[in-house]
Amino acid sequence: MIEFKGIVVRHVMQNFIVGAFKPPCNISISFSDGRTRKQVPLKKENGHTVMVPLFQSQENIVGEVLIEPIQGKKLEHNGVKIELLGQIELYFDRGSFYDFTSLVRELEVPGELYEKKTYPFEFSSVEMPHESYNGVNVRLRYILKVTISRNYVSNIVESQDFVVRNYTPLPSINNSIKMEVGIEDCLHIEFEYNKSKYHLKDVILGKIYFLLVRIKIKNMELEIRRRESTGSGPNTYVETETLAKFELMDGGPVRGESIPVRLFLSPYELSPTYRNINNKFSVKYYLNLVLVDEEDRRYFKQQEITVYRLLET
């Protein structure tokens, strides 16, 4: 009996401890057009993928916050606010966020809450200059963050992610890329790509001309590479990923031969090019032409391209 009572006592104590750390209310954040707005997948820190609303810069972000105290509990607070934050997090400094966009709306003055209450909010024509990005060493995210301030105990915080994509019109100038590369008296090739700026669903068209061939080429391929640079100075980290490999030729070319290039970008998970975003990170894309000779020596030439998001019609 005594042992049984001890078990009961321990069980009560465990419930008490759990209850002490459980927040005294539930918070939910909803968008007014949540049922009709397009949803896109977003990978969270825990590796799970969730569907979140999609916005673009200059849109209104409107919704409501529902705060529901636990039944029978009084919630004392020093005010309630909602923030719209655009943040950059570098993974070598995980947990430290750089806010490049920060807007706030006060929802409630200090007081007490006894029953559930709904607070409407609106952020009008929000400037969201950068696209959401999840990279190897950095992420750029947008969140709505509700904070209930309290005395003596920790604040109660709830956040809701959303994704931003910004669209670019067709560039007025889009020059082709022409280059000559070679090894003196051994190999001389000329390659041409139809343009230097490509949208995410574009097709890379081009030609490779062999002007001089005195080494035995085994094969030739075209790679799409993404280079992510984070940090600055001695804390600069560079990660290069090969996103695609496309075989252009299998076998030895002869002088005067021309090899066509036709590479569709839509199957690959590309983002737009990011150039020095708030001095925190850059993401650049390169076309890497690789030739392999019969002794497995590799010859390559890399050329940067600009990738942008074209408004889908």
Image (cartoon, rainbow, N blue to C red):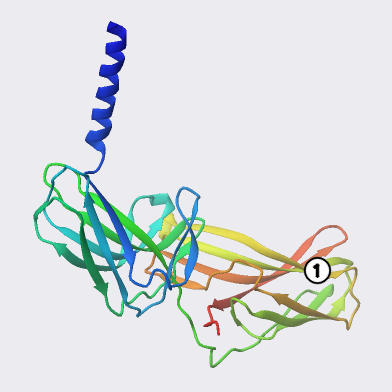
| Residue toward you, 148 or 273 | 148
Q: Residue furthest bottom?
A: 172
Residue 31 appears at what percent x and percent y? 34, 68
Residue 73 appears at what percent x and percent y? 16, 43
Q: Residue furthest top?
A: 1
Tag 1 secondary structure: strand
Up the image or down, 70 lies above or below 216; here it is above
Query: How many circles with numbers are drawn on the protein?
Result: 1
Up the image or down, 15 lies above or below 50; here it is above
Mark 1 neighbour class, 10 Å CA radius: few under 14, some 14 to 19, many 20 or more: many
- The residue labelled by disc 1 is 220
Up the image or down, 311 lies above or below 35; here it is below
| Residue toward you, 311 or 287 | 311
Q: Name which residue lies at 55% across and 82% down.
A: 312
Which image quadrant for residue 255? bottom right
Question: Is 270 on the left or on the right of 129, as rendered?
Answer: right
Q: Name which residue lies at 55% across and 58% down.
A: 239
| Residue toward you, 313 or 269 | 313
Q: Quadrant of the C terminus?
A: bottom right
Q: Name which residue lies at 44% across and 67% down.
A: 132
Q: Quadrant of the N terminus?
A: top left
Which image quadrant for residue 299? bottom right
Q: Amino acid at mark 1?
A: Met
Which image quadrant for residue 123? bottom left
Question: Is 224 on the left or on the right of 37, as rendered?
Answer: right
Residue 62 appears at what percent x and percent y? 30, 72
Q: Name which residue lies at 25% across and 37% down.
A: 21
Q: Residue furthest left?
A: 111
Question: Is 209 on the left or on the right of 142, as rendered?
Answer: right
Residue 279 appears at what percent x and percent y? 38, 67
